[in-house]
Amino acid sequence: MTDKRFQHFPSGNNNITTILQPPVAAEAMQPSCPSSVTAMQKFVFEFGSDGNIHSVSFLGNLSHEDIRLMLESVRRELYADCGSAIYSYLKQNNMPYFGLKTEMIPLNNQEIMERARRFLQLCSPEDFDVRICRTDNYYAVMDQQVRTPDGGCEGCYYAVRKSADNGGFQYRIVGQTYACSRPDDTDHGYFAVRTGRDSQKFYNLDTKTGEPVFPSFGCIDIMGVLINIDSITTSGQAKKIAVK
C-alpha cells in the first residue's frame, strides 16, 4: 500500500494543487525577509477529515507564537478553506513567506487509519521524519470516521506537531484510534500523548486503552488540541480541551 502523503505532495490526477502565491524574487519580499529564501524554513500544515487531507506548504520565518496566532485565526474555518485563510493571514500581517502552495489529497479510510497508528506507535523521530520528508515544521490534524457494515463506526483523531527549536526539533503527538461495534454496543479505543526531542526515542506521557477518551460521536475540537498541544500531558487534559 502506498501512503500518498508520506511521499510528500505526490503527483497524479487524484491531487488538486493550487498555487496561491506566484514565485517572486527574494528581494521583492518584505524588508524583514532574509536576503535569500535558503535561510527560510519549510512549513507544512495538514487538515484532514472525510477522506481528504488539505495541505498547505510554504517557506517562511515564523515563531511559535506566530503559528499559534495563525492557527487560532483559522480554527473555525472549514478545512478546505484553511489554505486561503492562511494565505490571507500571512498577507495581512506582513509575514515573510515564499511559494505558498495548497493541495487536496484524497485517502481511503484504511490509509488514514494506518497514518494514525504510525503516529501513535512510531519508535523514533527518525521514522517520523522519513514519513514527512524531513520537513522543518509540520502541523497536522485529523478527524476521521466511517460507518462499518455492522452499523458501528471506525475512526481516528490526531494532532501532530514537529517544530524547529534552538537548533533541534521537538515533537508532540496527541491522538486516538477507535471502533464501535453494533449491535453489542461496545466501544474500544487506543489513546496516546507522546513527545520526542531530536534523535531520542518517542516517550509516551500517557496512554489509554478500552473506552475511548474522545467519544465516538459528537463535536471534537482537534484544532484546539493542536493549538494547546504543549500543555497536554494526560488524557484528561486532552479531553477537557477537545470535548465541548
Image: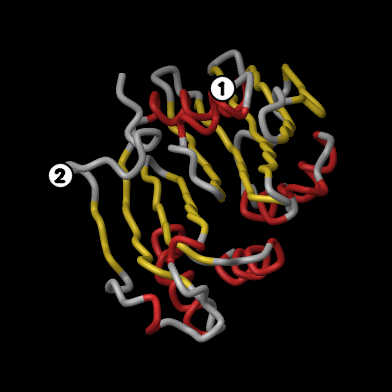
Q: Amino acid at mark 2?
A: Asn
Work out whether residue 178 or residue 123 is closer to the camera in this orientation and state it.
Answer: 123
Question: Is 3 rendered above or below residue 139?
Answer: above
Relative vertical location of residue 86 with respect to residue 102 in this rendering, above or below: below
Is 7 left or right of 128, judged from the image as shown? left
Q: Position of residue 152 (x, y in %)?
A: 50, 24
Q: How is the image coloured?
A: secondary structure
In the rendered image, the residue lying farthest to the top is: 184
Please give the label number shown on residue 179: 1
Q: Which badge, 1 or 2, is on the more N-terminal residue?
A: 2
Q: Residue at x 36, y 40 (%)?
A: 8
Q: Position of residue 200 (x, y in %)?
A: 71, 26
Q: CA distance from mark 1 to mark 2?
A: 32 Å
Name the secondary structure under disc 2: loop
Question: Can see residue 187?
Answer: no
Residue at image coords 40%, 81%? 27
**Which quadrant of the structure image shows residue 95?**
bottom right
Question: Which of the 4 image quarters holds residue 17?
Answer: bottom left
Q: Is residue 231 left or right of residue 107?
A: right
Vertical placement of residue 26 versus 141, above or below: below
Using the image as rendered, state which of residue 148 and residue 107 is in the foreground: 107
Q: Residue furthest front?
A: 35
Residue 13's label in the rendered image is 2
Classed neighbour count for the residue bearing mark 1: other residues with Cα under 10 Å, few (<14), some (14–19), many (≥20): many
Residue 167 horizontal/vertical position (percent): 68, 48
- Say if residue 56 shows up in the picture: yes
Residue at (68%, 37%) from the top-left corner?
Answer: 174
**Taking 205 as reference, is 52 left or right?**
left
